[in-house]
Image: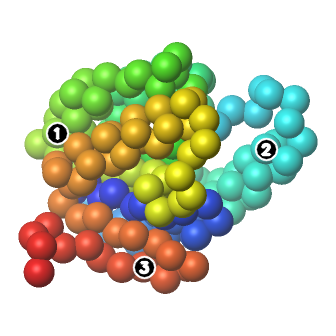
Amino acid sequence: MLSLVLGGARSGKSEVGERLAARLAGTPTVAGITYVATAVSDRGDADFDRRIALHRARRPTTWRTVEVAAGESLSPALGIDAVVIVDSLGTWVAGHAGFSVDIEDLVAALERRRDAAAHTILVSDETGLGVHPETTLGLAFRDALGTLNGRLAEVADDVRLVVAGRVLVLPREEI
């Protein structure tokens, strides 16, 4: 099962992803939960470090945390035999030079997990709802993440949009 949780900044998307993972933890077939953190506290930015600390504090101590450094592939972390929650794809994309990530490598890893009946929850920023970026770099990031989100939505079993803490399940077909 592959779930994609989208939302803007401070929308509550991470909490929704964490609640989905916690629900799965209560089922007999789940061996554990691995939280794949794409934000690493190494930038000397006090506000960023505070936000990371808040995310860490919310996670149960029974969850395993794997940190993926800037520029690294997510595929190795997705090989873990447990429920995996990745938070967040926006930070992961931002950590790659030119925002260039191997989307098909990620999709292949996610499909292997689905074939093995492993649950995966992906949390990602929905940048298309914000203001139009004024810089070339901002436009490149928005487009790269939007392309990734669109591709993942194609293969996801369910897609949720979080706005102001409220969750909308997005249908696969247009109504």
Q: Residues within 10 Å of mark 3 (few under 14, many from 20)?
A: some
Question: Disc 3 to disc 2, how far (Cα)?
Answer: 25 Å
Residue at 12% from the left image edge and 73% from the top image edge: 174
Disc number for residue 98: none
**1 lies above or below 76:** below
In primary-sequence order, the first of circles 3 and 2 is 2
Front residue (pair 119, 4): 4
In primary-sequence order, the first of circles 1 and 3 is 1
Front residue (pair 131, 109): 131
Q: Position of residue 72 (x, y in %)?
A: 49, 19
In which quadrant is the C terminus drawn? bottom left
> In the structure shown, which secondary structural element does the residue marked by tag 3 occupy?
strand
> In the structure shown, which secondary structural element does the residue marked by tag 2 occupy?
helix
Q: Can residue 38 be seen at all in this image of the molecule?
A: no
Q: Position of residue 160 (x, y in %)?
A: 35, 69
Name of the residue lying farthest toward the front? 134
The residue that mark 1 highlights is 111
Q: What's the amino acid at mark 2?
A: Phe
Q: What's the amino acid at mark 1?
A: Glu
The residue that mark 2 highlights is 48
